Image (tube, rainbow, N blue to C red):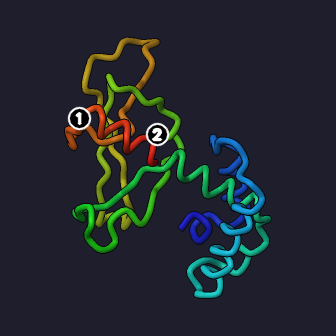
């Protein structure tokens, strides 16, 4: 979706502003590029996407994986189309994680905007100069610490 909506130049700009971790091994980057070529062949992303180098495309994928929010709507784990995509919010993805957050987020589908929206709300008083913190996993899930850690490591 990023390639379709932003185009290659937009994705390159995005890539330069986000954390993507360490560069992948060249073999893994080539595998990622193979997936991209198949997506282009099926018409899922614009033809111009094939101009990404394997390393740049792998970096883009890692940026989305590390900075994105998973949106599943009403789907439950194990159901078709569960966890098949992520969405990135340029400013919200810069908020640090904490197990003691002072903000919470809520992803929802906006029929008016025809897109996923992310609402961020203070859950504790925040004084000027306080760091803003969210839990990278939705608080409404009420997951035990062990499960939260497992999911954070997986994602």
Residue located at (47% from left, 29% from top)? 96
Q: Residues within 10 Å of mark 1 (few under 14, many from 20)?
A: few
- Between 18 and 146, the residue placed more toward the observer is 146
Classify residue 147 by image quadrant. top left
Label number found at residue 153: none
Residue 112 as seen in the image, left or right of residue 44:
left
Q: Where is residue 76 drawn, in percent x and y?
A: 23, 62
Residue 93 as seen in the image, left or right of residue 75:
right
Label number found at residue 144: 1
115 w.r.t. 38: above or below: above
Q: Earlier in the sequence, mark 1 or mark 2?
A: 2
Q: Where is residue 4 drawn, in percent x and y?
A: 59, 71
Residue 135 as seen in the image, left or right of residue 86:
left
Residue located at (44% from left, 48% from top)? 154
135 w.r.t. 48: above or below: above
Q: Name the residue under label 2.
A: 92
Q: What element carries label 2?
A: helix
68 w.r.t. 49: above or below: above
Q: Residues within 10 Å of mark 2 (few under 14, many from 20)?
A: some
């Amino acid at each position: 979706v990023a390639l379709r909506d932003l185009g290659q130049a937009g994705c390159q700009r995005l890539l330069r502003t986000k954390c993507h971790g360490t560069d992948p091994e060249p073999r893994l980057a080539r595998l990622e590029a193979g997936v991209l070529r198949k997506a282009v062949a099926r018409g899922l992303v614009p033809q111009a996407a094939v101009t990404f180098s394997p390393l740049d495309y792998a970096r883009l994928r890692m940026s989305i994986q590390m900075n994105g929010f998973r949106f599943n709507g009403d789907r439950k784990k194990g159901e078709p189309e569960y966890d098949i995509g992520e969405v990135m919010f340029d400013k919200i993805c810069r908020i640090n994680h904490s197990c003691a957050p002072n903000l919470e987020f809520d992803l929802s589908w906006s029929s008016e905007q025809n897109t996923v929206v992310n609402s961020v709300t203070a859950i504790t008083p925040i004084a000027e100069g306080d760091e803003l913190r969210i839990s990278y996993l939705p608080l409404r899930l009420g997951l035990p610490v062990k499960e939260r850690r497992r999911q954070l490591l997986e994602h």
